[in-house]
Image (cartoon, rainbow, N blue to C red):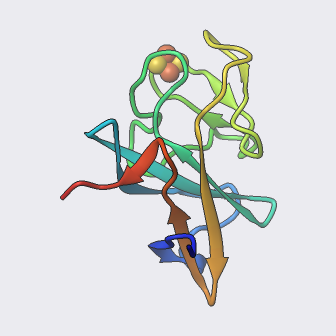
Amino acid sequence: MDELLIPVCSSVEIVDSGKGRRFPVSVHGSDASGFVVRYAGIVYGYLNRCAHVPIALDWEEGQFFESSGLYLMCATHGAVYAPTTGKCEGGPCTGARLRKISVCEQDGQIYWSPDDYVRPALA
Ligand code: FES
């Protein structure tokens, strides 16, 4: 079966180390969000859930990078994550990882793909 591709936004909206974009998902029947960011030209997707306490990373919607643009940062206690791997490189959950979500770009559009854990939004 072909992989399901769900549109997030257009590619030009997500610039290197700039604002990311949330998208609705469900996990075990509960509403949650995923997000996409771009780093060094490549789009990465993760579940918007800190590895320290399971809450959203961005205090201001779409604000995932810290000021240097090198790391994703959780707004609550400042855990920093490598954008390429989702691995926590510093903070209260060092060594833990964000949950990756499969994303791709096609024809100027960014898409995400559900898996066994991160499912399409319920509503
Ligand atoms: S909730 Fe993210 S660092 Fe504590």
Residue in the foreground of this view, choosing between 12 and 97: 97
Compared to residue 104, the image places residue 83 above or below, namely above
| Side of 13 relative to 22 (left or right) | right
Q: Residue furthest left?
A: 123
Residue 109, image x and y in percent?
56, 81
Query: Which image quadrant for residue 2?
Result: bottom right
Residue 56 visible to an observer of this rendering: yes
Query: Which image quadrant for residue 36?
Result: bottom right
Q: Residue furthest right?
A: 40
User: Which residue corresponds to the image point at 30% horizontal and 55% vertical from the top-left?
Assistant: 121
Quarter of the picture containing the C terminus is bottom left
User: Which residue corresponds to the image point at 42% horizontal and 23% vertical from the top-left?
Assistant: 54
User: Which residue corresponds to the image point at 38% horizontal and 48% vertical from the top-left?
Assistant: 61
Residue 67, image x and y in percent?
65, 40
Query: Which image quadrant for residue 42?
Result: bottom right
User: Which residue corresponds to the image point at 53% horizontal and 29% vertical from the top-left?
Assistant: 74
Residue 77 visible to an observer of this rendering: no
Quarter of the picture containing the N terminus is bottom right
Residue 86, image x and y in percent?
69, 36
Residue 24, image x and y in percent?
34, 54
| Side of 39 relative to 18 (left or right) | right
Compared to residue 100, the image places residue 123 above or below, namely below
Q: Residue furthest top?
A: 92
